[in-house]
């Protein structure tokens, strides 16, 4: 799309929209998105303040890399166990390099009938940081690798770092993606018009997200647990009037630590104890939304 001062969608005030009704009159669509990511030891990684050294300098960053590798070796399986306990299927934002590097993770996700969405090839570079002329093929290769590994083409996309370029949405529409979650500007889905091709925004969260809450803001596990419960309480109340989406966004190397996993367990137990909670995957939410949408 051409550069513009507002997004490729109409502004919509939440108190002036048609009512959204979820299956079985649920108030909240609960959408849990584990980010399963690949980090290369021979490339610079974010440090404690989330800044990154330039170029190839300061590698290997053993401690920073090791923490992230812990998530793929141990933490992700704790997340799987907790989510399965509460009957919640994940929608994985997946770096496609994971397919070759850690096929055991893909195998276990598929056993749980989790969904996959594209999340770039690795988590060292954002779409805004690669050569512009390579972006179209980069996105194509990402989605093709996930399709090859899982047997199902991803319906959605979440950019690494939630970054896009002015061309990203056009390339995603070309690839047949049906939803994108980078924009973090709503609690309900909405439609985008990408040169006449539709894309749905599926609400993701930069707030109920262990990376920003615990990693950046240094919340304790108990504070993050309280945050998830408080978020749910408000959306549940508002969902009585029109359905809401609650995204819980997770990173195995953060919430998958032994001293933090209990916060997720207790939050999901609380949320799932309420009537009117639809435990859904990304494509299930989007498909249902489009059935009732008259955009």
Image: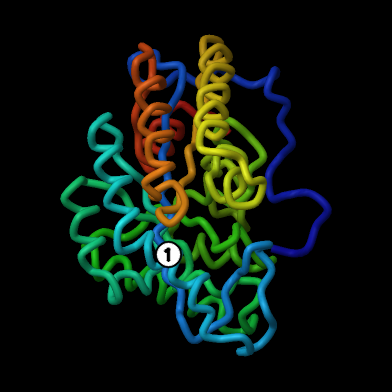
Q: From this view, report whether residue 19 is shown above or below residue 41.
A: above
Q: Residues within 10 Å of mark 1 (few under 14, many from 20)?
A: many
Q: Position of residue 203 (x, y in %)?
A: 55, 39
Q: Position of residue 107 (x, y in %)?
A: 19, 60
Q: Split into 4 quadrants, where in the image is the C terminus?
A: top right
Q: Split into 4 quadrants, where in the image is the N terminus?
A: bottom right
Q: Farthest left residue?
A: 111
Q: Position of residue 141 (x, y in %)?
A: 40, 76
Q: Farthest right residue?
A: 5
- Residue 144 occupies quadrant: bottom left
By what rule are the colours in the image chosen?
rainbow
Q: Position of residue 39 (x, y in %)?
A: 46, 73
Q: Residue at x 38, y 49 (%)?
A: 256
* Circle 1 SS class: loop
Residue toward you, 141 or 130: 130
Q: Residue at x 39, y 27 (%)?
A: 266
Residue toward you, 226 or 172: 226
266 horizontally vs 84: left or right? right
269 horizontally vs 210: left or right? left
Residue toward you, 258 or 128: 258
Q: From this view, report whether residue 208 is shown above or below residue 157.
A: above
288 horizontally vs 246: left or right? left
Q: Report the residue marked by disc 1.
A: 37
């Amino acid at each position: 799309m051409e550069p513009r001062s507002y997004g490729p969608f109409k502004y919509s005030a939440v108190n002036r929209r048609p009512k959204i009704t979820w299956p079985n009159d649920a108030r909240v669509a609960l959408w849990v998105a584990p980010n399963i990511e690949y980090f290369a030891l021979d490339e610079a990684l974010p440090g404690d303040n989330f800044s990154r050294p330039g170029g190839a300098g300061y590698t290997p960053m053993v401690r920073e890399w090791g923490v992230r590798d812990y998530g793929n070796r141990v933490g992700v399986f704790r997340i799987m166990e907790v989510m399965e306990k509460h009957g919640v299927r994940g929608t994985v934002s997946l770096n496609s390099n994971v397919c070759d590097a850690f096929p055991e993770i893909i195998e276990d996700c598929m056993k749980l009938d989790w969904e996959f969405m594209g999340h770039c090839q690795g988590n060292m570079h954002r779409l805004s940081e690669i050569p512009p002329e390579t972006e179209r093929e980069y996105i194509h290769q990402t989605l093709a690798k996930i399709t090859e590994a899982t047997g199902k083409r991803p319906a959605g996309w979440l950019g690494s770092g939630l970054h896009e370029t002015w061309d990203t949405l056009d390339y995603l529409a070309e690839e047949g993606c049906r939803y994108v979650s980078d924009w973090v500007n709503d609690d309900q889905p909405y439609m985008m018009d990408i040169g006449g091709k539709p894309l749905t925004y599926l609400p993701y969260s930069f707030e109920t997200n262990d990376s920003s809450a615990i990693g950046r803001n240094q919340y304790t596990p108990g504070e993050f647990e309280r945050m998830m419960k408080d978020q749910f309480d408000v959306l549940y109340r508002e969902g009585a009037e029109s359905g809401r989406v609650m995204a819980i966004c997770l990173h195995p190397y953060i919430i998958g630590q032994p001293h933090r996993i209990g916060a997720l367990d207790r939050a999901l137990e609380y949320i799932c104890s309420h009537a009117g909670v639809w435990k859904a995957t990304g494509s299930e939410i989007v498909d249902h939304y489009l059935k009732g949408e008259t955009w």
